[in-house]
């Protein structure tokens, strides 16, 4: 037997028993002729003691290096100086036999929660990084969540079905990853951006409640909460209305928060329309952990006195409680913040309502004290508050900028507490959004989303006014999940493709299978998907989803450990009838 106990389980009650442990050497210390070794495995750390009376054994212990994989047998003994930071801190093992199972070269960084390894190094040696307890515990949490989710959905009659990952294109608004087919030269599979159309087909097949913990692939620019491949808890149901889906998955979220964090979500989560979310928070994923909601100031500030405001299509402000004492330097920092390219505002107007009743603002020379008192009332500001105002010629862009400023202020004031969870649903999204890049309407969610029946008459005349039967689950300013009622009528689906700019031929070529399937008694259906990585990282309080993925990619989409992607052999290319345009690659570098 390699081991009789783990490194995390021995307690004072085990004193006097003989045990064998196996694990990795965290640390070797020599003290007063004795040698102490901290032995680590997945379950914890246990102290091994090599006594000076056994000189030969002690000498061997002195030659153990960090991360050697060893096996040790000995007696559990009560420790003289206990370590209350370790669950095993009351005991130690007086070792009688030591077996080195595998030596280790010196690891490139220390395998401890506060490691000295930078990101790149840790990613290159991810298998060592995963030995660190904090990283490991994220994966343990992820495991626990998937088990809870599977059991919850199973109890609600959902059936788990795997769908292929070599398919045709499934538009979810990103580029596809494609895979060349050797057997069908010149043709390509696409990796699913999500199992969207396949789960809809399963509804046509009569499966009525489906789920899958599914890998999804999207070739888009990466950020902290994005990876080229990520995992969804993907679900679909037949014979349901929007509220049926919302209620069921709200229950699932409630169950997860209770089991994982012992947090009770409210009995009914708030549902906020997209229009209100944009108006009050400038975002379709508002962070409700703090207030500072937007106040529109078009009437109050447009007085023919300050041309920047007079010409603006939108003027909005937030009231930051208790910050009238902000110094010149702090205000300059905020101005710099809003002018950063990521935020994109032209400037920032501030008004300080001081505790002594005086007012100081960056627009003193344009507005009278009375004007600023009117503003104070409109903002609901008190003495001691700081009002911050942005304006611009595009209302939604300016709102987005004000949203960044609001989040920044929330951050500065410590209001974005990772141990508080404010969840809500955003509903009534617009069905389409305009893409500047593509110069056309795009589906806000995806092309299979049902328009709000009340708005169907507007589909052709005013598509931008049509609301979708779509909903997002948002927690702490992060979109954790989203879904919609689906179109289950082939003709309406064809019409949607038309509005999205597909010719009938192209729509048929790409989605004929779905339009055809809808001819065979398609049930009304709806669904949603949660981003598992995001959900886990919120529960674990992580800054990046990478920290809860075993082998993540870096910001350039590279796996630095596997050194992927990489070039492939000419013979492989030949087999696939592919040629790489090296001169173009060189030119674009
Ligand atoms: N397939 C959608 C997505 O990946 C989710 C859904 O509508 O069910 O966002």
Image: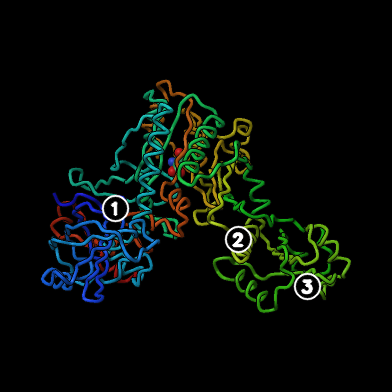
- The residues tagged by marks 3 and 2 sit, at their Cα atoms, a distance apart of 22 Å
Q: Secondary structure at mark 3?
A: strand
Single out the residue that lies furthest toward the bottom. 329
Q: Which numbered disc, 3 or 2, marks the residue that appears first in the sequence?
A: 3
**Residue 497 visible (yes or no):** no
Single out the residue that lies furthest toward the top. 521
Q: Look at the picture and state if 473 lies above or below 579.
A: above
Q: Look at the picture and state if 198 lies above or below 42.
A: above
- The residues tagged by marks 3 and 1 sit, at their Cα atoms, a distance apart of 65 Å
Quadrant of the rendered image holding ligand 1: top left
In the picture, the disc for residue 361 is 3
Q: Quadrant of residue 143?
A: top left
According to the picture, the residue beneath numbered tag 1 turns out to be 10
Q: Residues within 10 Å of mark 2 (few under 14, many from 20)?
A: some
Residue plotted at (68% across, 74% down): 331
Place of residue 199 in the rendered image (x, y in percent of width and height, measured from the top left): 39, 33
Q: Residues within 10 Å of mark 1 (few under 14, many from 20)?
A: many
Q: Identify which residue, 87 or 510, lies in the foreground.
A: 87
According to the picture, the residue beneath numbered tag 2 turns out to be 407
């Amino acid at each position: 037997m390699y081991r009789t106990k783990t490194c995390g389980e021995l307690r004072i009650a085990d004193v006097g028993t003989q045990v064998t442990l196996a694990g990795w050497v965290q640390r070797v210390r020599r003290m007063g002729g004795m040698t102490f070794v901290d032995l680590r495995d997945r379950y914890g750390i246990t102290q091994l003691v090599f006594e000076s009376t056994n000189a030969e054994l002690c000498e061997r212990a002195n030659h153990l290096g960090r991360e050697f994989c060893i096996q040790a047998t000995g007696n559990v003994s009560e420790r003289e100086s206990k370590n209350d930071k370790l669950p095993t801190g009351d005991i130690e093992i007086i070792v009688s036999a030591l077996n080195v199972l595998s030596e280790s070269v010196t690891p490139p960084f220390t395998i401890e929660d506060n490691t000295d390894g930078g990101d790149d190094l840790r990613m290159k040696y991810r298998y060592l990084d995963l030995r660190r307890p904090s990283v490991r515990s994220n994966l343990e949490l992820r495991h626990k969540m998937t088990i809870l989710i599977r059991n919850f959905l199973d109890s609600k009659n959902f059936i788990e079905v795997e769908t292929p990952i070599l398919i045709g294109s499934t538009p979810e608004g990103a580029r596809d990853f494609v895979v060349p087919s050797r057997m069908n030269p010149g043709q390509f599979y696409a990796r699913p951006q999500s199992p969207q159309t396949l789960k809809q087909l399963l509804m046509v097949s009569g499966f009525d409640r489906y789920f899958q913990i599914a890998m999804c692939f999207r070739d888009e620019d990466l950020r902290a909460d994005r990876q080229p491949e990520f995992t969804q808890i993907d679900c679909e149901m037949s014979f349901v209305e929007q509220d049926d889906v919302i209620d069921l998955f709200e229950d699932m979220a409630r169950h997860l928060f209770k089991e994982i964090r012992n947090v009770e979500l409210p009995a009914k989560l708030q549902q906020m329309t997209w229009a209100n979310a944009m108006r009050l928070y400038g975002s379709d994923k508002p962070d409700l952990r703090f207030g500072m909601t937007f106040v529109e100031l078009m009437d109050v500030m447009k007085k023919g006195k300050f041309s920047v405001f007079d010409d603006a299509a939108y003027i909005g402000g937030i009231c930051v409680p208790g910050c009238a004492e902000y110094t010149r330097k702090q205000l300059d920092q905020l101005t710099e913040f809003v002018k950063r390219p990521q935020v994109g505002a032209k400037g920032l107007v501030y008004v300080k309502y001081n505790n002594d009743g005086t007012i100081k603002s960056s627009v003193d020379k344009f507005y009278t004290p009375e004007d600023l008192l009117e503003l104070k009332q409109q903002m609901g500001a008190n003495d001691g508050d700081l009002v911050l105002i942005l304006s611009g010629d595009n209302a939604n862009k300016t709102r987005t900028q004000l949203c960044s400023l609001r989040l920044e202020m929330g951050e500065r004031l410590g209001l974005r507490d990772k141990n508080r969870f404010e969840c809500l649903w955003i509903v009534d999204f617009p069905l389409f959004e305009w893409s500047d890049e593509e110069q056309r309407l795009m589906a806000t969610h995806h092309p299979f989303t049902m328009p709000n029946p009340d708005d169907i008459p507007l589909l052709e005349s005013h598509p931008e006014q049509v609301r979708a039967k779509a909903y997002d689950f948002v927690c702490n300013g992060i979109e954790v999940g989203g879904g919609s009622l689906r179109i289950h009528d082939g003709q309406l689906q064809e019409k949607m493709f038309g509005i999205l700019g597909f010719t009938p031929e192209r729509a048929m070529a790409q989605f004929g299978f779905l339009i055809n399937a809808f001819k065979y008694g398609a049930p009304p259906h709806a669904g949603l998907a949660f981003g598992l990585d995001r959900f886990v990282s919120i529960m674990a309080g992580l800054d990046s989803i990478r920290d809860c993925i075993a082998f993540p990619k870096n910001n350039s989409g590279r796996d630095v450990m596997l050194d992927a992607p990489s070039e492939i052999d000419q013979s492989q290319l030949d087999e696939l009838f592919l040629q790489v345009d090296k001169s173009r690659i060189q030119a674009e570098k």
